[in-house]
Amino acid sequence: MKKMIFISFFLLSSVTFLYAVSPKNITLIIQGSGSQNFVEGFKYALTVEAKAAGYQVTDNLSSAKYNIKFTVEFDRIEQKSKFIVSLIKVDDSSVIVSMEYFFADEEEMMLYSQLVFFLLMSNLPEDVTASAPEDDTWRDKWIYFNLSFDYSMMFLLVNDPNLYDGKAVYNGKPGDPDFRVSPLDHKFTLMPGVSLGLEFQFLDFMSIEPHAQISMEQLVKDRLMYNALFSAALKFPLKFFKYIVITPYGSVAYSMRFPEELEIFTNYPQYIFYGGGIQIAMKAGNNGGLFFDVNYMYVGDTIMKNFYGDLYPEPKEGIHYDHHVLGFRIGYKIGVFNRKR
């Protein structure tokens, strides 16, 4: 677990550097030798990282500017496999940097593929990386279209003073011989969905986005519901980095749930205020970026039908819950029409 936390933190911090250093159409060749059961996997992983960072990868040594050359061998003293990798300038075969790592299995080494690539390429000469033309117009468009996959979590926390002892539906009156109770639990459900947005950036530091989302939920067995959420978000893009935009926002929304014949709430709040949200977008292409979005929503007091009414009819008007939603969204946004700065 400590290893995973360290790697996650390092990769998050390094990804900004990898995108901030322009590859200037640098062509790489990646060559491996040694234990064949490892070589192909490592070569593939390093190729993926190189292409993701904007480098070109070739199998022709004469057309490459730099060579990432590695070997995989078993070290009998350490009783572990050893990964030896070098960054070599092709035209004079000079070694820019060389590193070696020990690992117990392929899964462990594959976790370090992006770290290895980052450490190698961070040693490129400054004259190769520093003077590349920079294009940051992707973050300054008049209009953005975005499409995302959403994965939200709905929490319904029991909060009804009419319940017996604040946590149970019941039948009869307390003290009667036939008095019965059935304790209630808080409810939780996952809500997968998709959404579309149209963002208008009318100021450098402010934009507004009409948004439509549809998701499905199943709080009660055999009652699959769909939730269409139409919202308007006021967003505040923070452009501290050329290749990353951090955007906090707030929004109001209108909800429609269907089919009505399966309705499980007696008063589902329709106007919703997002307690908070933030979007982190990273450049991907000349006009757009990949983004990750997290938001929290407090819907308010929600009354659910008493589905235990045949045996425990009280309270008759329904059961009150505090309604919360924690949402996650991952997607892509593409912009059109450059804004003048």
Image (cartoon, grey):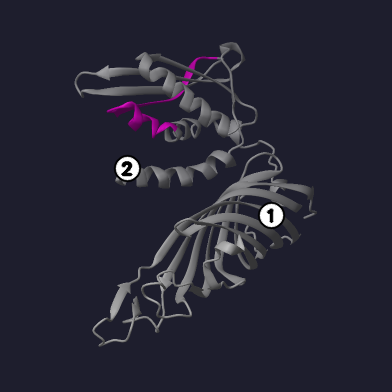
Q: Nearer the viewer, residue 2 or 221?
A: 221
Mark 1: secondary structure: strand
Vertical position of residue 24 compared to residue 336: above or below: above
Q: Nearer the viewer, residue 83 or 328?
A: 328
Label at residue 197: 1
Label at residue 3: 2
Instruction: State the quadrant of the N terminus.
Output: top left
Q: Residue at x 43, y 31 (%)?
A: 113
Amino acid bearing label 1:
Gly
User: In the image, residue 304 lies at what x, y percent?
Assistant: 48, 72
Mark 2: secondary structure: helix
User: In the image, residue 271 lies at what x, y percent?
Assistant: 63, 72
Q: Is residue 241 visible?
A: yes
State yes or no: residue 130 in magenta.
no
Question: Where are the magenta residues, as a range?
Answer: 92-113
Vertical position of residue 31 compared to residue 306: above or below: above
Q: Residue at x 29, y 77 (%)?
A: 180
State yes or no: residue 110 in magenta.
yes
Per the model, the C-alpha gap separating discs 2 and 1 is 37 Å
In this view, which residue lies farthest toward the left?
77
Residue 115 horizontal side relative to residue 234, left or right: left
